[in-house]
Image: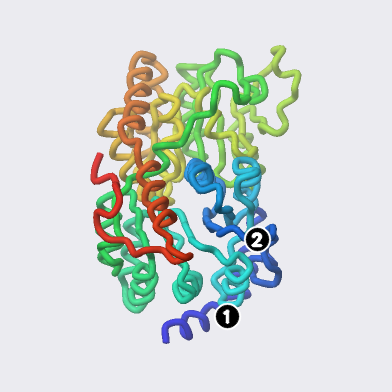
Amino acid sequence: MWNVFYNGLLLIASPAILVLLLAKPRCRRGLPQRFGFTTPRISPDHRPLIWMHAVSLGEVVAITPLVRELHRRHPDHRFAVSTATETGHEAVEQLLAGIAEHLYAPLDFPWAVSRTIDRLRPALYVFIETELWPNLLGQLARRGVPAVMVNGRLSTKSYARQRRAPVRWLYESMVRSLRLCLMQSDRDAERIIALGADPRSVHRTGNIKFDQPLPAPSERKVTRMELGLAPEAPLLVAGSTHGVEEELLVDAYRALLVRHPSAQLLLAPRHIERADAVEAMVRGRGLAVRRRSRVPQSDGTGGSRPQVIILDSRGELASVYREATVAFVGGTLVPIGGHNLLEPAFWAKPVLFGPYTDHCVEIANLLVQADGGRRVGTAEELSAQLVRLFDHPEERVRMGQAAHSMVQQNQGALQATIDAIDHQLTSADAGRFSSCSPGSFPLMAGR
């Protein structure tokens, strides 16, 4: 009965869904495929296929080491990675070339899901975090395809919503269909069991983002010249920022200039299509600004430097953090829930963030406990912390080292996740996967 009601609502909402997706440039490509009007272009191959789903760029980066290792262990399988955005598509082609093919994830319309599954005929479906879709998971279950959630998390907001009637029964049917729920934290494990998941399928494996590899020394790095930065200028890197938040950051930066007039600010909006609006806002506050895509090559020889750089490129923020004197991670001064706090911590940088960290609460708490990161509740607190850290280099170094040590101490989730999925693959018998029972494979019980 639930599927009739749910699919009826989907049909009613489909015009609004189409308009919403068309309004987002990063979501426009692949819409015919996502609506099920065309089928995914996957090369014909008789080997069993593992379908991995990652929404966009950040999720693709997170699962790349997982896909690479599974591919190494199981060369007799092929891999397909689905995303919902163009940035995700580009990341798959860049990071997993020769390992996985890309497709756009179907919207949860019955016909779109059915056509995609028929085209792929997956032996296993793996998705990151909490991409729960009733028709997709229901059709996979009916066809006997195991579904595995990796790096699972349930924010306080989403958990409260999912527990409400009448949607609770819908979520219960989805989580009970999952073969494995590999969760980031004890809190996440407890929550998904409370939603109805079989406790035998739920394991705390940790957060695989702790295990993201740093770029190798041989890999090309973005230079200060290319970014429009002065060679030795102190730098505040504010990554994955949102509206209103950027205004607060620019105001805090202006206060910082009083004591550190050579300091520069690099703003990396979460959605680069907002770059025009961010640039206009910075100019309106009387600061010299330039976009990363418009930095002239001659900037390396000297001359006037912009005070603010807007990073309007994709895939560079993680490596740009290495140039930071202090890092701020966005989505935290506004009620978004926070973005990747680990990227600057990897580079041993002190990390500042706001009070809204529901999407990364465990990492935020660990950073605070290690004093590798600090919460700032207001614009005034942000300004005070920036001035303090720019004034005291020894404190910056200590914080950065603490942040990096915290990352190292919490690694291991990737190996636990790979072992869990590997168990499902190696225990296959004539194309059927064995059921999982508690303790049937080694998993991280704690840190």
**Residue 58 appears in the picture as rendered:** no
Q: Nearer the viewer, residue 288 or 174?
A: 174
Q: Earlier in the sequence, mark 1 or mark 2?
A: 1
Mark 1 neighbour density, 10 Å: few (under 14) some (14–19) many (20 or more):
few
Residue depicted at 42% across the width and 87% down the height: 1
> What residue is shown with label 2?
23
Q: Nearer the viewer, residue 23 or 54?
A: 54
* Residue 105 vertical position relative to residue 299 in the rendered view, above or below: below
User: Mark 1 falls on what kind of element?
Assistant: helix
- Tell me how the rendering is colored: rainbow
> What residue is shown with label 1?
11
Tell whether 45 sits left or right of 417: right
* Residue 151 vertical position relative to residue 218 in the rendered view, above or below: below
* x and y percentages locating residue 416 in the rendered image: 35, 45
Residue depicted at 39% across the width and 31% down the height: 351
* x and y percentages locating residue 237 in the rendered image: 51, 29
Q: Gap between marks 1 and 2, in whole Å?
A: 19 Å
Residue depicted at 29% across the width and 39% down the height: 365
Mark 2 neighbour density, 10 Å: few (under 14) some (14–19) many (20 or more):
few
Tell whether 399 sits left or right of 293: left
* Residue 397 vertical position relative to residue 178 in the rendered view, above or below: above
Kind of residue at disc 2: Ala
* x and y percentages locating residue 422 in the rendered image: 41, 50
**Residue 104 appears in the picture as rendered:** yes
Q: Quadrant of residue 282?
A: top right
Residue mark closest to the camera, 1 vs 2: 1
* x and y percentages locating residue 290 in the rendered image: 67, 30
Kind of residue at disc 1: Leu
Q: Which mark is residue 173?
A: none
